[in-house]
Each structure stands twice: as structure tokens, then as C-alpha cells.
Image (cartoon, grey):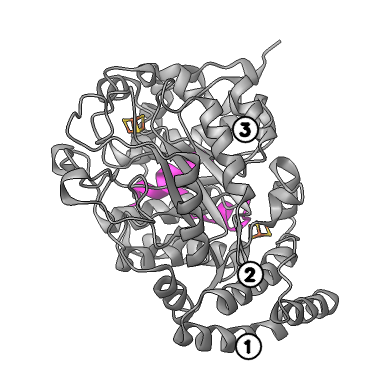
């Protein structure tokens, strides 16, 4: 019998199907009747197929494009309200045995400073992150079985969760490490990680093999099937992403959605998040050397079309993007952003000397977390440090059914306000605090259910009295 779980990478990301999708999208980019039908379907908020979404992405009719942006904005509002979840990356090690040509951590780069944090250094980094106000991290390492084996990653996660400094705690550790075995994914599950994130970089196999000439990452199928193994290992919150700029953006867009469709078909749950990084300048990397760079306009269209195609999937934009660009895509669909980030190993504690730098890429949005929190509030958003779901067992299909029924809002809205309150009391500058207190005063009466509203008032009071022992 046909078993979708046994499909191989080149079957669920079929090159022929992507090419057929791209020519279908091109043929129909001005087919107003078809575009209208797709938009009507999208309004049901149950998503679109990769073919349908690709037609919207290709659409060149100005009026229809405005409708696409408007619909994305509306879907964003319906599913995510005005909350924006905040997180920071934590680089543990930049030793890497792979040869990725777009990343300065590639093995051939002999002049970048190579660093690996000890558990004591991780402690110091985490305290610095807690002192900024972060509750949610994503840990990053290069792939190196000797320097950063799974045991090192697991020990580091344990260290991170164990640190309670003042009122601080990291309540959710998401993990971005190289594709690995089902057994290792099981171990990550047991270590209580949040989301397992792995970027595909590019879905085009031929390009993938050229861009990854050496090292274990060279194997397209092993990399592309990683999320299947992660799911098999019990990690049901997985995060997809491509690195825009490596291949044609329309190819990557179709591949990304086909990957999401595959996970949904095989495991009953699509990706928890999709990240949309664009290639950035770094130590020995010049983004202009890649032919497929995309401008801000196309980038915004991609974000809008992803929002429409997979309304239930969170979308992440990092500090690779500028303030202006982030402002634009927040409106169109992005639900999580990083803030106050360092992309070097050990960068939260120490400024690196010019001749020993270890960043993975240059940051574009260099503002502090406090500045970002303040900016979000002034732009009409509620910054959220909520991490409740995985600790409450709301992962995978359980999470998705709450999201699809709209019930998750009963958790997200109050948790955003309560975690913001914690942030304001413990970490915010006086100016940010003043803006935030007004926001909380204004927003709490809008919490729809009376019973939930009462709980929020009670918890806010307890937070003021010093209680930080809440499950959000
Ligand atoms: Fe290593 Fe990842 Fe950089 Fe590739 S992208 S060189 S695997 S750290
Ligand atoms: Fe995210 Fe769950 Fe918190 Fe909502 S309640 S913000 S979905 S962790």
C-alpha cells in the first residue's frame, strides 16, 4: 500500500512538479478569473496548495497584488492578533566540517576565529540574555562530531534550563543543529526542547549539491528528510526555512510549501514555523556573488503569500533584516522576531576584538531588546515573551487543533500581557516601562472572556508582588 511516510526527498520535493508549478504560475500570472478563485479559497483560511500559492506569488496585476497584501494582513490579524513573540539566538560553537559556500563557518575558512563555549561560558551568556529579558532562545552550532556532538548539545540545554538568575529563566530552548538521526532527535525530545529548526537552504538538488560541495551536509536526501526523522523521534514542532538568494525565489517558495504539505500528509501536522532569511554579508561571504538576491518588494510578497498559504504556521524574521523591512513584514505575516541578537560565539558577554571575530553574518537591526520592545509597542504590537505551549503539552497536532479552532487566542493574548508585565518590571528602561504599563492598562479590558480576564488581573497583581512562577 502507498505510504506517504516512506516517500523519499526527491518524491515529496519533486523537481518536475516544481518546474510544472512554475510554468503554471507563469501562464496564469494575469489570469484574473483564476486569481479571484484562489483568493476566494484563501479567504476560507484553510490554506492553499503550492500551485495555487505560486500563482499568487507570480501575479503581476497591481490591483490583485493589493488584494493579496490586504488578505495577508487580515489573516495575520485573525490568527496572531497584534502579538509578536521575541527570541534570541545563542551560538554555542562555530566549528564546522561542512563546506557550505554561503556561510563563513565553512571548513575551508581558516582565518575566522573558531570558538566553542564551555558550560561555564554558556552560563555567562545565558545570564546576559536573561538580564536583557529573554525567555526563549534558539541554540545554534556548526556541524562537527568531535567538537559539538549531541552530548555537548544536550549538556548545554540542561545548563541553559538550570540557570535561574534574579527573576530570569530561559523557558524554551529551540534548537537549530545539523540533520541527525532519529535516536538523536529522540534525545532532544527528552531534553524538552521547543522547536527543532533546520533550514533547507535550497530545495533545488543540483544547486544544493554545488552549494554544499563537501561534508555530511552534501547529501541532499539526508538533509531534506531530516524533519521526517525528527517527527519519528517525537519532535512534532519543527521549523522550516530556506536561504533566499541561493536559488530562484519562486522555486524555493514552491519547494517550501511542498515540504509543508508532505509533513501534514505524513504526520498530520505541518511545520510549526517557517523562517525567511536572506543571504547576508559575512566574514568571507559576499552576497553579491550569488545571482538570486531578492529585493524588499519581492521579499514582502513572499511573506504575504506564505501567510495566506499556511495560515497556521508561525513566521520568523531575524535581525538579518533592517528595522524598515521588519516593520513591513510584521504587518504581512511575521509572528516572531529576534531582538538584541549577537551572531558570534560568546558575543553577549564580550565584544570580540577585530582580529578574532566569529559572527555567522552581519546584523542589520542592531537595536537593543529594550529598543525593540518599545518600538513594537509604539507600532501597535504587543511584545510577547510567552513560551507556554510546549510546557503545557500543546505541541504538534494538539497545538494545531487549538490554533485552527481559534482557542489558542485565549492563551496567547493573556500570556503576552503577563510576560510583558514581567519584562517591564524586571528589565525595561523607564521610558519603555511607561509605554508598556499604558498598553497593559488599555489591553487587559479587551481580553474577551470574563473568566480569563479575571485570571489576568489576578496574575498581574501577583507578578507585581514578585511572583514569577507562572506557566507562560
Ligand atoms: Fe556549517 Fe551550518 Fe555554516 Fe554550513 S551553514 S558551514 S553547516 S554552520
Ligand atoms: Fe506561542 Fe503558545 Fe504562548 Fe501562544 S500560548 S504565544 S502559541 S507559546
Upstream in the sequence, badge 2 or badge 3? 3
Cα distance in 3D space between marks 1 and 2: 16 Å
On the question of residue 399 being in view, the answer is: yes
| Residue 48, percent from left and from top | 55, 45
Specify whether residue 38 is in view.
Answer: no
Residue at the outermost right position: 451
Answer with the quadrant where ligand 1 appears in the image.
Answer: top left
User: Who is closer to the viewer here, 14 or 373?
Assistant: 373
Precedes in sequence: disc 1 or disc 2 = 2
Vertical side of 369 occupied by 287: above or below: above
Confirm or reject: label 1 Cβ below 8 Å from ligand 2: no
In the displayed structure, does residue 356 sit left or right of residue 181?
left
Q: Which mark is residue 419?
A: 2
Of the image marks 1 and 3, the number of the one nearer the N terminus: 3
Residue behind mark 1? 442
For label 1, the SS is: helix
Report which residue position mark 3 lands on: 188
Amino acid at each position: 500500500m502507498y505510504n506517504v511516510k516512506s516517500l523519499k526527498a526527491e518524491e515529496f520535493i519533486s523537481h518536475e512538479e516544481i518546474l510544472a508549478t512554475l510554468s503554471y504560475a507563469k501562464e496564469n500570472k494575469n489570469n484574473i478569473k483564476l486569481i479571484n478563485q484562489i483568493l476566494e479559497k484563501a479567504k476560507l483560511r484553510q490554506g492553499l496548495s503550492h500551485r495555487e500559492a505560486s500563482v499568487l506569488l507570480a501575479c503581476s496585476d497591481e490591483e490583485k497584488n493589493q488584494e493579496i497584501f490586504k488578505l495577508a494582513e487580515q489573516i495575520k490579524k485573525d490568527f496572531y492578533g497584534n502579538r509578536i513573540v521575541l527570541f534570541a539566538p545563542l551560538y554555542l560553537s562555530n566549528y564546522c566540517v561542512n563546506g557550505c559556500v554561503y556561510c563563513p563557518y565553512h571548513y575551508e575558512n581558516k582565518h575566522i576565529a573558531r570558538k566553542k563555549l564551555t558550560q561555564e561560558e554558556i552560563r555567562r551568556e545565558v545570564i546576559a540574555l536573561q538580564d536583557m529579558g529573554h525567555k526563549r532562545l534558539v541554540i545554534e552550532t556548526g556541524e562537527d562530531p568531535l567538537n559539538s556532538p549531541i552530548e555537548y548539545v544536550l549538556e548545554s540545554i540542561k545548563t541553559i534550563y538550570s540557570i535561574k538568575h534574579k527573576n530570569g529563566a530561559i523557558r524554551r530552548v529551540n534548537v537549530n543543529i545539523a540533520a541527525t538521526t532519529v535516536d538523536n532527535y529522540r534525545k532532544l525530545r527528552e531534553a524538552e526542547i521547543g522547536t527543532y529548526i533546520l533550514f533547507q537552504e535550497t530545495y533545488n538538488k543540483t544547486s544544493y549539491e554545488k552549494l554544499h560541495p563537501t561534508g555530511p551536509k552534501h547529501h541532499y536526501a539526508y538533509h531534506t528528510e531530516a524533519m521526517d526523522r525528527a517527527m519519528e523521534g517525537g519532535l512534532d514542532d519543527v521549523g522550516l526555512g530556506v536561504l533566499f538568494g541561493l536559488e530562484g525565489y519562486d522555486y524555493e517558495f514552491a519547494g517550501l510549501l511542498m515540504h509543508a504539505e508532505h509533513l501534514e500528509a505524513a504526520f498530520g501536522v505541518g511545520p510549526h514555523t517557517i523562517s525567511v532569511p536572506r543571504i547576508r554579508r559575512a566574514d568571507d561571504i559576499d552576497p553579491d556573488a550569488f545571482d538570486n538576491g531578492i529585493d524588499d518588494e519581492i521579499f514582502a510578497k513572499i511573506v504575504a503569500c506564505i501567510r495566506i498559504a499556511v495560515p497556521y504556521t508561525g513566521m520568523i524574521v531575524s535581525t538579518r533584516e533592517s528595522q524598515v523591512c521588519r516593520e513591513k513584514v510584521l504587518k504581512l505575516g511575521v509572528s516572531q522576531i529576534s531582538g538584541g541578537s549577537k551572531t558570534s560565539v560568546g558575543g553577549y558577554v564580550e565584544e570580540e576584538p577585530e582580529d578574532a571575530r566569529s559572527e555567522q553574518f552581519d546584523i542589520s537591526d542592531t537595536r537593543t531588546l529594550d529598543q525593540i520592545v518599545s518600538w513594537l509597542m509604539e507600532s501597535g504590537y504587543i511584545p510577547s515573551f510567552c513560551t507556554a505551549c510546549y510546557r503545557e503539552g500543546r505541541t504538534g497536532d494538539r497545538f494545531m487543533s487549538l490554533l485552527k479552532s481559534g482557542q489558542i487566542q485565549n492563551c496567547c493574548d493573556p500570556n503576552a500581557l503577563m510576560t510583558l508585565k514581567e519584562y517591564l518590571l524586571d528589565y525595561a528602561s523607564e521610558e519603555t516601562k511607561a509605554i508598556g504599563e499604558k498598553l497593559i492598562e488599555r489591553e487587559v479590558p479587551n481580553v474577551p472572556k470574563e473568566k480569563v480576564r479575571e485570571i489576568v488581573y489576578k496574575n498581574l497583581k501577583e507578578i507585581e508582588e514578585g511572583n514569577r512562577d507562572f506557566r507562560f
